[in-house]
Amino acid sequence: MLLFVFIFSPVMIIAGSRGKTETDKSLLASMSVKAVPKSVEAIILQAFSGWQEAEATYYDPLDPKQTRENPDGRGAFGRMIKSGSIAFGSVFTEIFRLEKMLVYVQIKDLNIMTPYGLGIFRIDDAMGSKNIAKDQYNIDFFHRDLGRAHKTQGRFSVMFKVLKIEKASQ
């Protein structure tokens, strides 16, 4: 009985047709192709590819009233805060830190030259992430990067997008 099922099964009939099989297009159409999983970098670039609004201000990384007690000028990513550094407040910030990512953002219409280019900043610090909504973003600029107009304004809105992501060599 087993031999009968094996010899006359549909699989054997298709495979045994003159040594050449033709693929049924409807069979191919019904087959699901698994997508290649995206990297964390690709997902973040896709999420931030368009302009996003953030509430911005500035801070001095050496002032304990504006950051943690006994500040040493290093941000949450272990890098010194300097021109071109920003602190980023988002639900994604911890992923950036844990994955050791160098994340560069472009700030729209902010004509500040940094070591990374005109209006381009690197996320080197994190802001407290408690109670940050999924689509809420905060940016604190290094105090020396902003002029008097922005500093007297206090909080202001900026548009940003992630420009580039690299892996840190550390």
Image (tube, grey):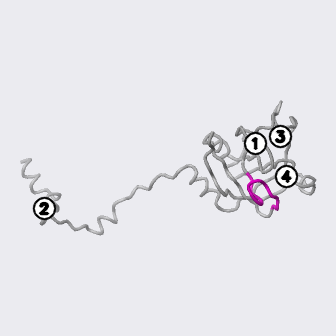
Query: Type of residue at label 4?
Result: Asp
Residue 111 shown in magenta:
yes
The structure residue drawn at horizontal position 10% and vertical position 57%, both measured from the top left corner, is 8
> Where does the image place residue 112, in percent across and percent down from the top left?
82, 58
User: Which disc is residue 145 wearing?
Assistant: 4
Query: Type of residue at label 3?
Result: Pro
Q: How far separated are the C-alphas under marks 2 and 3?
A: 75 Å
Lower sequence index among marks 1 and 4: 1
Q: Is residue 71 left or right of residue 21?
A: right
Query: Type of residue at label 1?
Result: Met
SS label for mark 2: loop
Tell which tag, 1 or 4, sits nearer the viewer.
4
Magenta segment, which residues? 110-121
The answer to whether the residue labelled 1 contacts the one labelled 3, judged by CB atoms less than 8 Å apart, is no
The answer to whether the residue labelled 1 contacts the one labelled 4, judged by CB atoms less than 8 Å apart, is no
User: Which disc is residue 61 wearing?
Assistant: 3
SS label for mark 4: loop
Q: How far separated are the C-alphas under marks 1 and 4?
A: 18 Å
Q: Which residue is mark 1?
A: 127
Residue 107 found in image quarter: bottom right
Tell which tag, 1 or 3, sits nearer the viewer.
3
Lower sequence index among marks 1 and 3: 3
Q: Nearer the viewer, residue 125 or 155?
A: 125
Q: Nearer the viewer, residue 29 or 95?
A: 95
Q: How far separated are the C-alphas under marks 3 and 4?
A: 13 Å
